[in-house]
Structures are given as structure tokens and as C-alpha cells.
Image: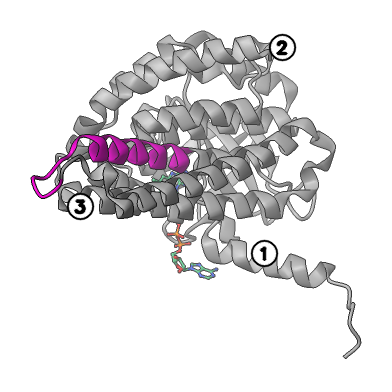
């Protein structure tokens, strides 16, 4: 994509961001799914931006996808995280190229022509985060020429608005975990409104119940981790840190605007002139600079060097750890600048504070990242000193 094309897309996204920003308080306080935001995303064609060009999409790469997502998250974090699952899932299917070509093309056409919405539903109450290796309790059984799926998924973002889910299920016959494309119009697919979270309320990450759902054979996407062992790194999951970076940037902007206009009568000018406030602003800038640099440099490597993607799993995890924790830190600093008003339900910082916490519980989790880094260091280290 040329810089000019990127700029045009970014401008479209900035318009969406500004619209979402106006609704984000209402979305959070009502706890309802932001259907209006999704209508605007669909009207703008955003859902097909990571669909490969050969299937009618824009073929957005990881780097550009993250730039768009960071902007959307400044408007509404819950909308950005949700739509990030959709665009990211399509990007992964396209990059992995491991599914039946005709079936993937068919899905892409539904996304391009009808702006069909999909997500991955991999989490379950009994197994917890799928990244920790738990085997799904959801079962898939081959009966004749179709699969029958039974189970329950938790944390299914956008559940009520989805057209399709990529459901993970245990295949008893082979003792492997498979990924299946489930059409939400099929009998036996039901959403249970269990989402009552303090954070990212607009994602409506409700439960998805699957009771005797039949799935045609071609909708068996792949066996998890079959292509390579260890599993291929998931670059698309960088949409998670991009989202929390966006929320942190919005918090930073709010704090700077506040510091520029708030002048208590104990001071000759606004609080931005106070050295301690300036120190906190500087700390926010430092954290955001670090976060952006590492997020986009690793995304750039993923995009520019497809042949080395297999080797950057640890770096992807480290980016997620650094950026999400820095985002929590930035929102905290922004709240300290603004003071007690930042806790008001009328102040967006209070929402950013709750939303940014979700980043800690999106994959991969901090302890897993640290463990992975330690293992890599120990595996690679060559003794250089004779003790
Ligand atoms: C806003 C939001 C949206 C989401 N959307 C989706 C979605 O659309 N699709 C989807 O599939 N998922 C989604 N998720 C789920 C997410 O990816 C995680 O699976 C989910 O948050 C559960 O993670 P957990 O660490 O709390 O769970 P658990 O794995 O149950 O862990 C709970 C705690 O137990 C401990 N623990 C558990 N297992 C281990 C272990 N093996 N070793 C060490 N400690 C352990 C840890 O202390 C951990 O904090 C979403 C989550 C959030 C917050």
C-alpha cells in the first residue's frame, strides 16, 4: 500500500474514531453492545480490510491493521478490541493459508459482500485461557459427512452480533483440537447474556452455547498446531496491545487537556506549569514512545520478513507484555495528574482505568511471557565464563 492509500484509510478511521468517542460513555454505562458503531464500521467496509485482495478485500498487512486499530481504540476501546478479533482472525487465516481454499474464499466473499462478522471462540470456563494449553470441553464428532458440535464457550466477544464463530473443539477420535467455522444461523447456536464485567463492557463477551450444531465438512478449518510444532506464532494477536495503546493515548490526551485548562486559585496559571505535573506528562510520553516503537518495529518485521515469522514468537509476547503494562501505567499517571475528579463516573479516565485492566487478562498473560523469555535465554545461552 502506498503512503497515500494508507493516509486515506487512516482518515476514514479517524472519522469513525471520533464518532465512537461520542458514544463510548453511553456504551460503557449501559453495558449494551455498540450496534451503531458496528453499523458504521460495516458501512465503511472496514470488516473486509484484511481480506486478501484476490477475494475483494484490501489485503491490509499486520502493520497497517495495527495502526488503524490503535486509532479506533482511542475512540472506544471495547469496539476496537471486538473488531480487532474479526480483522485479526481473517488476517491469520489468510497468512496461514492452511484452510480449504474454496471454503476460505466463500467466507471472504460473505465478509466483502455482506460485511459478515466473525470471531474466534476458544475460551471455556473449565479450561480457562486457551493459551495455557487446556483441552476444550466442547466436543466435535464426525457423523456421516458432517461434524456435530456440543459445548459452551465463554468470553465470546460480540456474541450477539456474530454471523460466524471459529470454535475450538476436542475431536475424540483423533484426540486433537480442531477449529470449526460455525454459522450462527444454524440450529443449536444460542447466546447466553453472562457478561457482567467492569471492564470492556461494550464487547458483550457473553457465553456461546452450542447444542448439536451441525457443521459441513469443509468448515473444518484446521487442527490446532498441526502445521508446525511448536505452533506458529500469532502475529495478529498484536491487535491486543494496539488496542490498549490506543486507550492509553486517549487517557494521555485527556490529562494534557485537563492540565492545560485547570487552574485552581492557589496557582498563578494552569497546573501544566507545575514541575511535578510536567514530570508526569514526560513519564507518559516516555512510556507511549517505548510502546509505539516496539509495537510497530516488531509488526514491521512480521510484515516485511514472512520467512522469519516462525522465530519471533518470544518477541511478539514481549511486545504484548510491555505495551499492555505500560498502558496501565500511563492511565494511572493520567489519573494522578487529574486528581480525584478522575474517579468520577463522568470522567472518561475512570472508564479507561477499568478498560485497560482487561489487557492483563488477554493472551498471552504476563507470567507466561516471562517464563518464555527465561526459557529462551537459558536454551540459547552458551557458557562464556569458566567458573
Ligand atoms: C475483554 C475480553 C474479551 C475477550 N474476548 C475473547 C474472545 O472473543 N474469544 C476468546 O476465545 N476469548 C476471549 N477472551 C478471553 C481471554 O483470552 C482469556 O481466555 C480469559 O480472559 C481468561 O483468562 P484468565 O487468565 O483469566 O483465565 P484462566 O486460565 O482461568 O486463569 C485464571 C488464573 O488462574 C491462574 N492459572 C490458570 N492456569 C494456569 C496455569 N496453567 N499456570 C499458571 N497459572 C494458571 C492464573 O493466576 C490466572 O490469572 C476475552 C477476555 C477479555 C477480558
The structure residue drawn at horizontal position 19% and vertical position 31%, both measured from the top left corner, is 26
Residue 169 belongs to magenta span: no
Question: Observer-nearest residue: 252 or 53?
Answer: 252
Q: Are marks 2 and 1 in contact (CB under 8 Å)?
A: no
Report, in whole angstroms, how far the alpha carbon at label 2 lies from the one at label 1. 37 Å
Q: Are marks 3 and 1 in contact (CB under 8 Å)?
A: no
Q: Which residues are magenta?
A: 243-267
The structure residue drawn at horizontal position 55% and vertical position 54%, both measured from the top left corner, is 322
Q: Which residue is mark 2?
A: 54
Q: What secondary structure is marked by label 3? A: helix
Give the farthest residue toward the bottom: 387
Task: From this view, report whether residue 39 is shown above or below residue 340.
Answer: above
Name the N-terminal-most of marks 2 and 1: 2
The structure residue drawn at horizontal position 18% and vertical position 50%, both measured from the top left corner, is 343
Predominant secondary structure, magenta span:
helix
Report, in whole angstroms, how far the alpha carbon at label 3 lies from the one at label 1. 38 Å
Q: Viewed as shown, does residue 25 lie left or right of 172?
A: left
Q: Which residue is mark 1?
A: 372
Q: Viewed as shown, does residue 233 lie left or right of 81?
A: right
Determine crowd level at label 1: few under 14, some 14-19, many 20+ residues with C-alpha closer than 10 A: some
Q: What secondary structure is marked by label 1? A: helix
**Residue 161 placement (x, y as % from top left):** 36, 27
Q: Which residue is mark 3?
A: 339
Which of labels 2 and 1 is toward the front? 1
Amino acid at each position: 500500500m502506498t503512503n497515500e492509500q494508507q493516509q486515506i484509510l487512516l482518515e476514514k478511521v479517524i472519522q469513525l474514531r471520533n464518532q465512537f468517542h461520542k458514544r463510548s460513555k453511553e456504551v460503557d454505562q449501559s453495558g449494551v453492545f455498540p450496534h451503531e458503531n458496528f453499523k458504521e464500521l460495516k458501512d465503511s467496509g472496514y470488516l473486509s480490510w484484511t481480506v486478501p485482495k484476490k477475494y475483494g478485500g484490501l489485503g491490509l498487512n499486520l502493520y497497517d491493521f495495527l495502526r488503524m486499530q490503535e486509532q479506533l481504540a482511542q475512540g472506544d476501546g471495547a469496539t476496537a478490541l471486538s473488531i480487532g478479533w474479526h480483522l485479526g482472525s481473517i488476517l491469520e487465516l489468510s497468512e496461514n493459508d492452511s484452510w480449504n481454499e474454496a471454503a476460505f474464499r466463500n467466507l471472504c466473499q460473505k465478509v466483502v459482500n455482506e460485511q459478515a462478522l466473525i470471531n474466534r471462540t476458544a475460551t471455556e470456563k473449565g479450561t480457562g485461557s486457551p493459551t495455557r494449553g487446556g483441552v476444550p470441553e466442547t466436543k466435535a464428532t464426525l457423523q456421516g459427512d458432517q461434524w456435530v458440535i456440543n459445548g459452551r464457550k465463554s468470553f465470546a466477544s460480540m456474541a450477539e452480533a456474530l454471523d460466524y464463530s471459529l470454535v475450538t473443539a476436542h475431536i475424540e477420535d483423533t484426540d486433537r483440537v480442531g477449529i470449526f467455522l460455525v454459522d450462527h444461523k444454524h440450529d443449536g447456536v444460542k447466546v447466553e447474556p453472562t457478561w457482567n464485567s467492569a471492564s470492556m463492557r461494550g464487547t458483550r463477551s457473553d457465553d456461546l452455547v452450542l447444542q448439536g450444531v451441525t457443521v459441513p465438512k469443509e468448515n473444518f478449518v484446521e487442527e490446532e498446531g498441526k502445521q508446525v510444532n511448536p505452533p506458529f506464532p500469532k502475529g495478529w494477536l498484536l491487535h491486543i496491545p494496539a488496542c490498549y495503546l490506543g486507550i492509553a493515548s486517549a487517557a494521555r490526551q485527556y490529562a494534557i487537556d485537563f492540565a492545560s485548562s485547570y487552574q485552581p486559585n492557589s496557582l498563578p496559571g494552569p497546573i501544566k506549569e507545575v514541575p511535578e505535573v510536567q514530570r508526569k506528562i514526560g513519564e507518559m510520553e516516555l512510556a507511549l514512545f517505548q510502546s509505539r516503537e516496539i509495537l510497530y518495529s516488531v509488526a514491521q518485521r512480521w510484515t516485511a520478513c514472512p520467512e522469519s515469522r516462525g522465530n519471533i514468537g518470544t518477541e511478539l509476547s514481549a511486545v504484548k507484555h510491555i505495551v499492555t503494562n505500560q498502558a496501565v501505567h500511563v492511565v494511572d499517571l493520567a489519573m494522578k495528574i487529574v486528581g480525584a475528579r478522575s474517579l468520577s463516573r463522568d470522567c472518561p479516565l475512570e472508564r479507561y482505568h477499568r478498560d485497560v485492566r482487561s489487557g492483563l487478562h488477554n493472551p498471552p498473560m504476563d507470567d507466561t511471557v516471562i517464563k518464555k523469555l527465561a526459557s529462551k535465554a537459558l536454551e540459547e545461552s552458551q557458557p562464556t565464563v569458566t567458573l
